[in-house]
Amino acid sequence: EKNGYAHFMLKEIYEQPRAVRDTLAGRLCNASGVIELPEINVSPETFQSAQRVLIASCGTSWHAGLAAKFLLERMARIPVEVDYASEFRYRDPLVSGSDIGLLISQSGETADTLAAQAEMIAKGSQTVAICNVVGAALTRKAVGTITTNAGPEIGVASTKAFTAQLAALLAFSLYAAQSRGTMTPEEIQALSQDLLKLPALMETALRSCQPVCESLAEIFANASDFLFLGRGIHYPIALEGALKLKEISYVHAEGYPAGEMKHGPNALVDETLPVVCVATKDIHDPTSVLKYEKTLSNIQEVTARGGRVIAIAVEGDNEIAKLVEHTIYVPQAREVLLPLIEVIPLQLLAYHIAVKRGCDVDQPRNLAKSVTVE
Ligand code: M6R
């Protein structure tokens, strides 16, 4: 069933363009240019009067939630709070009927996420699920569900479920933006069109990153620690890169917001430390470019201390290669679409390092695919 791939994880990494295509199918602009999401059972009026979106999830699904905060706040101008599901109910959270609860889970059976959902419902909020398993416990308590059509995910390390979650969250954010009138119909149409082209860009990233990641794994397989940096929406992707590496290769890795380095972690930097920096940019978006420039300064702080920077950058960015030891290029895209592309080299890097270290990629020690205890 691995279709000729050495591991399920690798097969699932390669299935991502298909998973994203299937998750978006039928959910973007119809002929009249309108986003329809009847399966969530949340009316445009509810989105208009909603005060906040409360997100709770775990692990990789929590990273998708962090990215969703950027998407929803930017596109639908609604405040978003993101919690670890395991923490949510232990702080007597403030929840009201004007909040929309959003639970994200590949399995839909994660005990912590179910407990957070129960807390939201008990306090009067409606909950929507984003889930990869039809009929899972999470979906049975939700008013509506966006099913991610990633298909069964076997590898313990989540890959295709993550990018499918991001695709579902983009559709959710577009619908929220349409309901709240924070994007014009033309903007919604244009973004929908670009979303349809996203799977092809992911294919390109898979093709171009594979050999580079394999050779970088050769160079860095024996490193004992890694840092992963990113800024803005790229920060959750840095966290995801670090989690992938930790889970399957047992190498210590931390994700950090690039701008926080000077507030402490720069002390860790020496000539043995690989620092993977997500330094992509949307060249048509001034905020994205500004953020990128700040990230470049953070990179220079690392290289000045001897740190070995591996940058993830967009094609055409020839300047960055002069500053860092290694550059992995991915296709250019809009800021809100870059996460689904830039996570690919991080997954491949973790995969190849784990293989080089002789680890059991699909069944890492001490971990279960679905965590059904709190
Ligand atoms: O099934 P869920 O999405 O609720 O699972 C949440 C986490 O347990 C899961 O993402 C875990 O962190 C993965 N092993 C990450 O690769």
Image (spheres, grey):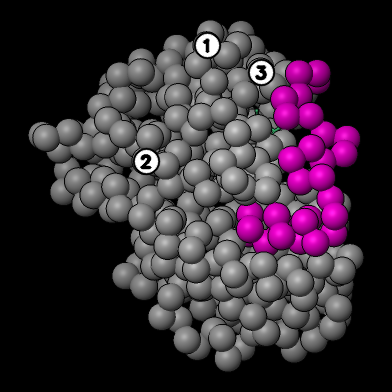
Label 2: state its secondary structure.
helix
Residue at image point 57% right, 73% down: 328
Q: Earlier in the sequence, mark 3 or mark 2?
A: 2
Q: Is residue 367 left or right of residue 168?
A: right
Q: Identify the residue under disc 2.
A: 21
Q: Earlier in the sequence, mark 1 or mark 2?
A: 2
Does any atom of ligand 1 lie closer than 8 Å to the CB of label 2? no
Q: Quadrant of ligand 1?
A: top right
The three-letter code of the residue at mark 1 reads: Gly
Residue at image point 45% right, 19% down: 145
**Distance CA(mark 3)–CA(mark 1):** 10 Å
* Residue 371 inside the magenta-drawn segment: yes
Q: Identify the residue under disc 1.
A: 135
The three-letter code of the residue at mark 3 reads: Glu
Res 1 → quadrant? top right
Q: Which residues are magenta?
A: 346-374
Does any atom of ligand 1 lie closer than 8 Å to the CB of label 3? yes
Q: Is residue 5 left or right of residue 97?
A: right
* Residue 102 inside the magenta-drawn segment: no
Indicate whether 166 appears above or below 102.
below
Q: Position of residue 198 (x, y in %)?
A: 36, 52
Q: Residues within 10 Å of mark 3 (few under 14, many from 20)?
A: some
**Distance CA(mark 3)–CA(mark 2):** 25 Å
Q: Is residue 83 left or right of residue 76?
A: right
Q: Identify the residue under disc 3.
A: 109
Q: Position of residue 13 (x, y in %)?
A: 57, 48
